[in-house]
Image (cartoon, rainbow, N blue to C red):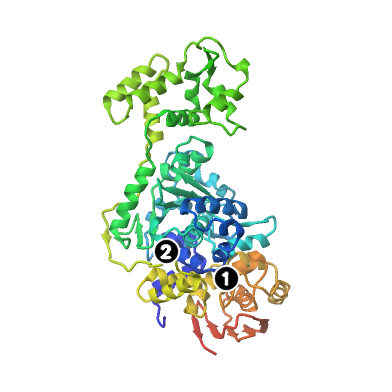
Amino acid sequence: MTCMDPKELEKYSSAYTLSDMEVFVFPELMYSLVLANIMSPVIWRWRELDCFRKLEGKGAYRKLLRLRQYIMDEYDFNLDLETWGLTDKQTELRRFSPFIAPEQIAASNALFGYEGDRYYFDVDIRRHFGLDRYTEDVIPYWKTETVEAMDAFRFKPNYTRGAGECVSLSALYAAAAFIVCGVPLDDIFMILTPLHSQDFIDIGDGIITNNRRLVTKAMWFNGTEISNKAQRALRNEQVTIVAHRTGYVHCLYRQATMDPKAYQRLRTRLRSYLQADLNMLTFASFLRTYKDFQQYFQVCRDCHGSPQFVKAEVLYAYEHGSKYRVGDETFEKLLAEVNDEDFVWSPIPGRLRCDQICGLIEERRLSLDRPSDREMLRQALAPVIPDPDQFIRDLEGFLRIEPRLPSADKDFVPTDPVDLAVQMDRQEVIAALAEQRRTNKVADLAFYAFRDMTACDWRPFVKAALERSPVSLARAQGKDLHQVYDWLGQMPNESIYEGPRLAQPDEVVNYQRGDGLEKAFVLASIIYRQYPSTPIRIEAGSTQVVLEAGGTYTFASDKGLRQVIEIGQPGQIRCHGP
């Protein structure tokens, strides 16, 4: 790319830093990160692990379950506010004002005033994320990690595994589902809300990723605390972005690039996933979630031909520490674990029998869509429950979640989709994306997120390094340039990225390692901020890098990259061959 206007330069530079705000403003970036992870050698190596090799020939669902366990074993969920440093609202609003109005950002982004619906408003979003320790204007620079950056968390103090925040984990899952599990990209949809990122994988009844976990439809409605937490985003938030191999739909942008048929497919399939029938199992799950209603119910069992009764809340308490559950096929085994002293021989006054209510539901096949069925259920509940109408409303809300997806009333712009087949090997994937980047912006941006400096204009990388490296600046406080140079020299001379791919300065500083060329950019980012009138020149050779900025600093490099970077003020960047 020989020429970039300022807006394009802003977008392409964002492919290197991938902050939550950047993904929100430039929705193409979300899927570009997935493609960068698909090009990465890291996930392709997973296929050679014994735990995945022995699943060859098995179905995608079986492989996804194994993938879930692997990700849970190898990665932590990270929400450290200061991992990627701090910025402030006004700086970010000014930066993105050419693209989105500040009031729209504030209405849609958690860091700029968005409180979400009931749940998030109740918990106070700044306190929920620990932002209350800062001034109202200070916000974390949440960046989405590539798989290499996720793996590199092992080099940070107090980490023994890889890590990443929710957007990183959703991108990791999407790429790994394709590479390791053979799930076609056509069946993977990314769903972003102001506070969360998830994938919907359209196989079987559907699967939703939630940080490190996978949630099937049955799990979604099982009423456990883990499942209830997984529901928070889709229950309480507006979906801001949907991303797919065919494009994206954004809640604020009039134009959408996703194939409208693919978007309609998602809307239909996700709604189906988020709705369950009323039956004995879902009724038991509802009481598991709505604990306050348990006091109105009792459970009956047969004891040698005679009925015995136990309070519902007592029975649900036995689930803790047990692998058996109320209402499913393990129910009788759970009853067998209950202490005999918790049962009584006579019905407990003021309580409904679960078996009778569930019998009514099952025999009549009650549907809350039918007014007559609602009335029948209300009459069955009324003798004991003070407000049976509220009970039914809560039950209906438990069984039906209406996702607040971006409107389908968009101007859908025909766009060439990303076209990759699960039968391809890694080199074929890279070759296909290299061909598609000519006509597909997402594929083009993927090479920037992938950090392949032999295939990209260097100016976006340099711009991102200079302007968005708050961790480097913070760690350099109190050091003069020679001390910074010595500090960099003490770090291992190894990059977290293989081949001619470069880490950003804050990745070098966070993981305390980097190739000499990467270290040179750390020093350049510090000089650029601390000594703004000093011109900077970096000459990268095949084995050595020389940085000149009021002094000369040399670094050894194994990247084999040759480039000259000249940085003027403010932010004038020239990149050319040596």
Q: Position of residue 258 (x, y in %)?
A: 33, 61
Residue 214 shown left or right of residue 484 in the figure: left
Tell me the quarter of the image containing the C terminus. Answer: bottom right
The image quadrant of residue 343 is: top right
The mark nearer the N terminus, 1 or 2, is 2
In the image, residue 576 above or below residue 213: below
Q: Is residue 79 visible?
A: no
**Residue 508 rendering spot, x and y as whole percentages:** 63, 69
Pick the front one: 510 or 204: 204
Circle 1 packing at 10 Å, graded few (<14), some (14-19), many (20+), is: many
Instruction: Please state, as top left, top right, bottom left or bottom right, where the N terminus lies in the image.
Output: bottom left
Q: On screen, 251 above or below 342?
A: below
* Residue located at (40% from left, 45% from top): 205
Q: Is residue 176 above or below residue 41?
A: above
- Relative to 537, 415 lies left or right: left
Q: Residue, x 52% and y 73% (percent of image)?
A: 451
Q: Which residue is mark 1?
A: 504
Distance in Å between CA atoms under marks 1 and 2: 21 Å
Where is residue 474 drawn, in percent x and y?
63, 64
